[in-house]
């Protein structure tokens, strides 16, 4: 379908009328959260862009936005957010067998199962394909040994998206397999890490003879790198989904009570995510409230920041429209990621100019109840999570500017013969 024609046209009108009528007949804040989300799964209104045979309605992203707008209009709660939907489900939809989809997708939608992403290791973050966590076959099972780190939500996840090395005799990208591992088992130990902003979203995860069934290999043995690329492609959208979820938690009724309880348990690791984006949305209001809006130096920096924000929004919109028209994603991903880092850093600087030394006070008596201090302590995460700024520049250099590739000494060599970042 031509997306441009659909929006504002008869397709949009018909989807809008259909979802409105359905919400009028079914949305009831006194239902239980799980029961409501089960209904969303059955009818496809919770994930309208997913295929009709897998809990969706096969709508285009633009028409999916129309459905989301109607949900917002009546204040209806959506499907569970977080690593389950934004990372696991999208990867399962592309690579899982029908048996895996039947078993795993529905509890992700309802929020009964939460997931974490077991990719980074102490010796492999940017060099993800250099990972050394191993999985060795034992009958119908695989035995996992090694360590992961920076694993958001591992402390409550039921499943982990695990990259492990299953073949040491081939070049590094070819020997990796993607597993769906049960986290609640004796061979998995999760230890929380506390960040400088006071939150403890991440964990170290240790595997000692942990077990995972062959039925939980995703996308085939040795094909883990291709599957991982799907997960990574969706990682940046995670933060947007989280922000939308926090915004819609204000209603009254049983469903909202349960929803808020979910926000302080399963969603707790993401509570500071709005602050890590730098909160440029607060800048003008803060400058006025503190009387700093008449200072020419502050005004100058605010204007520069807001120009950057607008340019980043337009680039993101261009990328979204391109995707809606079926265009393969181009360099906008890396450009957008870098722009987000630049905006977050600039916003933190402007907040400091506005709040001056008060910006350093954390806690409820700090500037804006401590939110400004949390911004300053959280923005460095944007330049690291989902691929660092330097890695984005490498991608832009190689794929957009056509610069020579980074020299690599491991190309074509069996992984066991390659120098590692850690002893193995
Ligand atoms: C908020 C947040 C959430 C996260 N959640 C998860 C999660 O749930 N699961 C998970 O698996 N991981 C997670 N991570 C980890 C994240 O993916 C890694 O931190 C990231 O990929 C960088 O890896 P590293 O920390 O090992 O840094 P390194 O790769 O060791 O990099 C160190 C420095 O060297 C630079 N560098 C490295 N290689 C190059 C190069 N080739 N060229 C130029 N410079 C280079 C980097 O840019 C960086 O400045 C999370 C991180 C953050 C901040």
Image (cartoon, rainbow, N blue to C red):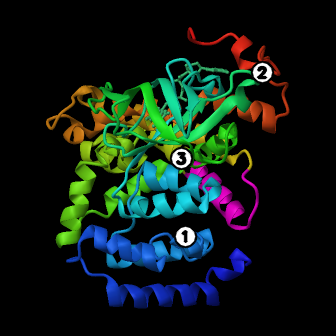
388 above or below 156?
Answer: above
Q: Is mark 2 within 8 Å of ligand 1?
A: yes
Q: Looking at the image, is mark 3 or mark 2 nearer the viewer?
A: 3
Callout 3 secondary element = helix
Callout 2 secondary element = loop
Ligand 1 found in image quarter: top right
44 above or below 209?
Answer: below
Give 399 or 201, whichever is nearer the viewer.
Answer: 201
Other residues around mark 2 within 10 Å, as few (<14) / some (14–19) / many (≥20): few
Give 385 or 377, whichever is nearer the viewer.
Answer: 385
Can residue 412 be seen? Answer: yes
| Residue corresponding to mark 2 | 406
| Residue corresponding to mark 3 | 216
Q: Pinpoint residue 222: horizontal percent, then vertical percent.
A: 69, 36
Q: Pinpoint residue 158: horizontal percent, then vertical percent.
A: 37, 46
94 above or below 115?
Answer: below
- For marks 2 and 1, give the CA distance: 41 Å
Other residues around mark 3 within 10 Å, as few (<14) / some (14–19) / many (≥20): some
Q: Start and end of the magenta stretch?
A: 310-329
**Is residue 318 part of the magenta span, yes or no?**
yes
- Residue positioned 79% across, 31% down in the render: 398
């Amino acid at each position: 379908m031509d997306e441009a024609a659909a929006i504002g046209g008869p397709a949009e009108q018909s989807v809008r009328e259909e979802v409105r009528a359905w919400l009028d007949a079914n949305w009831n804040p006194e239902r239980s959260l799980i029961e409501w989300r089960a209904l969303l799964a059955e009818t496809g209104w919770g994930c309208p862009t997913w295929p009709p045979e897998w809990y969706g309605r096969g709508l285009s992203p633009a028409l999916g936005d129309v459905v989301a707008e109607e949900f917002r209009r009546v204040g209806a709660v959506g499907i569970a957010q977080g690593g389950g939907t934004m990372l696991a489900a999208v990867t399962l939809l592309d690579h899982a067998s029908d048996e895996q989809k039947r078993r795993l997708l529905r509890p992700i939608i309802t929020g009964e199962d939460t997931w974490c992403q077991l990719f980074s290791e102490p010796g492999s973050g940017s060099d993800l394909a250099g990972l050394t966590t191993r999985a060795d076959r034992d009958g119908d099972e695989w035995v996992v040994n090694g360590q992961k780190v920076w694993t958001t939500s591992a402390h409550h996840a039921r499943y982990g998206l695990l990259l492990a090395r299953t073949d040491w005799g081939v070049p590094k990208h070819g020997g990796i397999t993607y597993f769906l591992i049960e986290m609640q088992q004796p061979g998995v130990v999760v230890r929380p890490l506390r960040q400088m902003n006071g939150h403890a979203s991440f964990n170290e995860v240790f595997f000692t003879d942990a077990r995972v069934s062959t039925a939980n290999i995703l996308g085939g043995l040795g094909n883990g790198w291709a599957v991982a690329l799907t997960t990574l492609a969706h990682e940046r959208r995670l933060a947007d989904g989280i922000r939308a979820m926090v915004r819609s938690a204000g209603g009254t009724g049983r469903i909202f009570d349960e929803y808020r309880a979910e926000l302080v348990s399963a969603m707790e690791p993401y509570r500071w995510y709005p602050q890590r984006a730098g909160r440029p949305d607060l800048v003008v209001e803060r400058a006025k409230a503190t009387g700093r809006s008449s200072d020419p130096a502050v005004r100058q920096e605010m204007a520069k920041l807001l120009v950057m924000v607008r340019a980043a929004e337009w680039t993101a919109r261009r990328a979204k429209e391109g995707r809606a028209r079926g265009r393969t994603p181009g360099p906008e991903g890396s450009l957008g990621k870098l722009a987000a880092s630049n905006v977050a850093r600039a916003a933190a600087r402007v907040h400091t100019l506005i709040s001056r030394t008060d910006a350093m006070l954390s806690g409820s008596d700090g500037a804006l109840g401590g939110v400004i201090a949390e911004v300053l302590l959280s923005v460095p995460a944007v330049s690291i999570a989902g691929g660092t700024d330097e890695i984005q520049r490498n991608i832009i250099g190689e794929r957009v500017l056509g610069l020579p590739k980074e020299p690599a000494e491991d190309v074509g060599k069996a992984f066991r013969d390659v120098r590692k970042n850690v002893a193995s």
